[in-house]
Image (tube, rainbow, N blue to C red):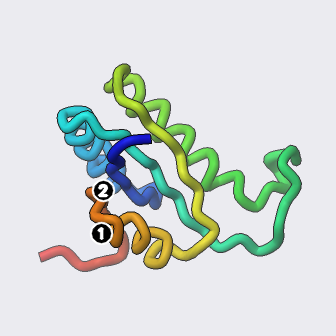
Amino acid sequence: MGPVGTIGLDGSPEIMAAARWAADETERRTLTLRLMRSWPVLVPEPAHIPSGIDRNHGAKRLAHQTQTELQELHAGLVIVSSPAADDAEHALQKPASEFEPTVLGSLGRPHG
């Protein structure tokens, strides 16, 4: 995989707007777009379990829905989903430390 732009997903309307912007920019710059959804993993889980008992189902669903929406808008863009078993701050520090473009939202932060 070549150069990558990363966006951290939290499911908020603001981050979805940022994800669409990130897709525009990564496509324009011919980068791969990485969708990162972080969550603390409470216990290791088997690969194939029903969604009703999969503690990670919500995070997986969010990444899948976002990828589907963005792929419809940017058919030629390479989009990968990258779950991170960590809190958002630590999960996003690695891409940022590698000088990749990283898009952050503002969930829970005052505006203005």
Relative to residue 79, is residue 110 depicted above or below?
below
Q: Amino acid at mark 1?
A: Ser
- Who's the residue at 48% across and 77% down the image? 90
- Front residue (pair 64, 79): 79
Disc 1 and disc 2 in contact, CB within 8 angstroms? yes
CA gap between label 1 and label 2 equals 7 Å
- The secondary structure type at the circle numbered 1 is loop
Q: Is residue 11 left or right of residue 30?
A: right
**Sooner in the amino-acid sequence: mark 1 or mark 2:** 2
Instruction: Indicate the quadrant where residue 21 lies.
Output: top left
Residue 58, given in percent of the width and then of the height, sits at: 64, 54
- Who's the residue at 41% across and 32% down the image? 78
Identify residue for label 1: 106
Identify residue for label 2: 14
Residue 57, given in percent of the width and then of the height, sits at: 70, 52
- Who's the residue at 71% across and 70% down the image? 41
